[in-house]
Amino acid sequence: MYFSTRLPENFNQNSLTILLNQLKRASIPLLDLTTSNPSACGIEYPRDAIIHALTDQQLFNYKPDPKGLKIARIAISEAYGHGINPEYIQLAASTSEAYSMLFKLLANPGDSILLPSPSYPLFEWLARLEGLNCNIVPAYWHDGWNLDVDAIHRACDSRTRAIVVVNPNNPTGQFLTETEWFNLLELATEKALSLIVDEVFACYPVEHQNDAIRTVLEGPTPKCPVFLLSGLSKLAALPQLKLAWIIMLGAASSATEQLAFIADQYLSVSATTAYATPKLFALAPGMQEQIKHRLGKNLMTLDNILKLHPHLSRHPVYGGWSVLIRQPAIEDDESCALRLLSDYRVLIYPGHFFDIPKKGFLVASLLLEPDNFEQAITVLAEGIKLK
């Protein structure tokens, strides 16, 4: 049987996954610093209110709308403010599906998108599955990762169609700065490119960052097409309810019918979730406050433990659910992660999983239950010794 060349050539597991599966098969308990699923981290959900939101009687009348049911789009518009027209909002089942829709909209097979790194490893495969190339443009390091707009400019060619940025970035937690956003807008306008801005973590600021753009909605109306993405997965800590949205800004507003046409071929958004959206948005602030408290508590715990281990440090967490821990560069990140899992039963991501080029970064989730987080970080710190 022959398969598409857009798929991986093989599905071989990396060394960390092989070891992890061996330990799971042996039922060996682990200290997992990778868990970022809020439904698996002891977050308290208003269960009765969520169940009530999902029992709207209108769901028994099927009224498909390619853009997504208007009741949900109005709720999203009102939650954001900024005078967003619900007609310029397109619903999707997830941000991953939203990316696929936008890649279909903006590019032909063989075209390319640009992605500043470090970043989440999902994008390259989403692009490849649409027959596109994903060109990675490394950010430069100066007290954090900064967008190299000059490098992005040089990477543009006749097949480039869009630039993807995540605000705040996953996993570095850095928000775009005012200067970076202005330069991106200028570049996209000059090159006739679209900007896709993923703001799923924008509602989780943690530490203060100078000149941060908390959301691109705060800036002037862009001249180039800007597509803003988010979803219930992070905004309301409800990844299982599968609802995301695309907000079309600036010249992107001309794409409403084209996006609706693409969505009409799938009609993937559940009416149950769409009708529940207004009530779920009303519950979101309480969920966010609970998570922000969790993030702050675990970050304080991490800082207290790092004081006892001065050979370790962390990157500032301006936003999001992850923290970058820096260990001495005498050991590469993958070797360190493998040793921690093998010898200490601590699971943590090596930085290169997120295209972090600098040696020695590990990526941990701040969403864990506080006691579990403290135990895992304590063991990790003891396991990373200066040789």
Image (spheres, helix red, strand yellow):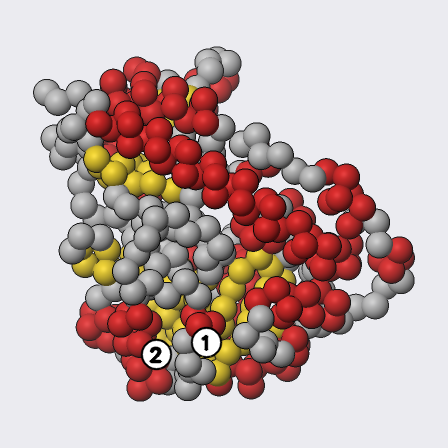
| Horizontal arrangement in the rendering, residue 148 relative to residue 5 (left or right) | left
Camera sees residue 189: yes
Position above or below: 141 against 131: above
| Horizontal arrangement in the rendering, residue 98 relative to residue 147 (left or right) | right
The crowding category of the residue bearing disc 1, from other C-alpha atoms within 10 Å (few below 14, some 14 to 19, many at least 20), is many
Q: Residue at x 19, y 73 (%)?
A: 150
Q: Which mark is residue 226?
A: 1
| Horizontal arrangement in the rendering, residue 121 relative to residue 238 (left or right) | left
Q: Residue at x 83, y 68 (%)?
A: 63
Badge 1 element: strand
Report the front residue among 189 and 375.
Answer: 375
Identify which amino acid the numbered label 2 is placed on: Leu
Report the front residue among 152 and 369.
Answer: 369
Q: How many marks?
A: 2
Where the C terminus falls, by quadrant?
top left
Identify which amino acid the numbered label 1 is placed on: Val
The crowding category of the residue bearing disc 2, from other C-alpha atoms within 10 Å (few below 14, some 14 to 19, many at least 20), is many
What residue did someone put label 2 on? 185
Q: Are marks 2 and 1 in contact (CB under 8 Å)?
A: yes
